[in-house]
């Protein structure tokens, strides 16, 4: 554990740069809505809260025993936040390895998705042999090819609206 605040009554498996609270000790609407969806008892569910102010999103990992989901509460002023769940569904349909959207509640600016873990590309390749790092990056590039190839075809076929491309600085 590092850079962590842990509330009373929590069972914490691992956490970095977050706050962990027992779900019944939180008054956040996003947590209550997520519990309604999962059906998990609040007193036996630990919530890890990670705030990402730059993206105007707050991530909640809900954990009960070995079961985990991620809830994302977002500010709709950032258009990419509004479209995030739809983009994930499109990428999943195209065959990209992304979390599955389990519930989308745009009225509450909240969606719930499967939890793929907290291993980052950097952490997963740090202190690895060059051959292993190369293999991991080949897998990542393979996913990027699917995203830009088949993903673009699926998006066009579904007439899925795309965001404007980035402009040079």
Image (cartoon, grey):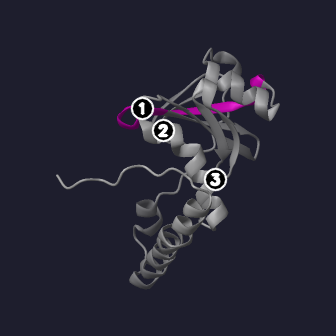
- Which of the two residues, 133 or 75, is positioned nearer the viewer here? 75
Residue 94 in view, yes or no: yes
Q: Which residue is mark 1?
A: 56
Judge depth for marks 1 and 3 and give the one in front.
3
Picture layout, residue 162 above or below residue 52: below
Looking at marks 2 and 1 on the same chain, the residue that comes earlier in the sequence is marked by: 1
Residue 115 in picture, x, y percent from top left: 64, 49
Judge depth for marks 2 and 1 and give the one in front.
2
- Which of the two residues, 65 or 72, is positioned nearer the viewer here? 72
Residue 98 in view, yes or no: no
Picture layout, residue 45 above or below residue 145: above
Instruction: Verify CB contact (< 8 Å) between mark 3 and mark 2.
Output: no
Instruction: Verify CB contact (< 8 Å) between mark 2 and mark 1.
Output: yes
Looking at marks 3 and 2 on the same chain, the residue that comes earlier in the sequence is marked by: 2
Looking at the image, how many numbered discs can be counted on the residues? 3
- Which of the two residues, 88 or 32, is positioned nearer the viewer here? 88
Q: Quadrant of residue 13?
A: top right
Q: Quadrant of residue 28?
A: top right
Q: Is residue 45 magenta?
A: yes
The magenta segment? 42-57
Residue 167 in picture, x, y percent from top left: 24, 53
Which of the labelled discs sits on residue 76, or is there none? none
Which of the labelled discs sits on residue 81, or is there none? 2
Residue drawn 44% across the image and 60% down it: 123
Which of the labelled discs sits on residue 89, or is there none? 3
Q: Residues within 10 Å of mark 1 (few under 14, many from 20)?
A: some
How far is disc 1 from disc 3 in space, using C-alphas? 21 Å
The kind of secondary structure element at disc 2 is: helix
How far is disc 2 from disc 1 in space, using C-alphas? 8 Å
């Amino acid at each position: 554990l590092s850079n962590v605040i842990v509330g009373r009554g929590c069972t914490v498996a691992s956490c970095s740069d977050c706050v962990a609270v027992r779900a019944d000790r939180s008054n956040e609407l996003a947590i209550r809505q997520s519990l309604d969806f999962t059906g998990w008892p609040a007193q036996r569910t630990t919530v890890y809260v990670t705030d990402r102010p730059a993206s105007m999103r707050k991530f909640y990992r809900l954990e009960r025993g070995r079961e985990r989901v991620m809830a994302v509460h977002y500010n709709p002023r950032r258009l990419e936040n509004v479209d995030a769940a739809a983009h994930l569904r499109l990428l999943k349909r195209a065959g990209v390895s992304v979390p599955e959207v389990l519930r989308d509640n745009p009225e509450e600016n909240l969606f719930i998705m499967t939890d793929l873990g907290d291993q980052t590309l950097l952490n997963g390749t740090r202190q690895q042999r060059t051959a292993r790092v190369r293999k991991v990056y080949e897998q990542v590039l393979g996913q990027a090819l699917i995203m830009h190839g088949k993903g673009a075809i699926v998006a066009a076929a579904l007439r899925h609206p795309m965001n404007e491309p980035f402009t040079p600085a």
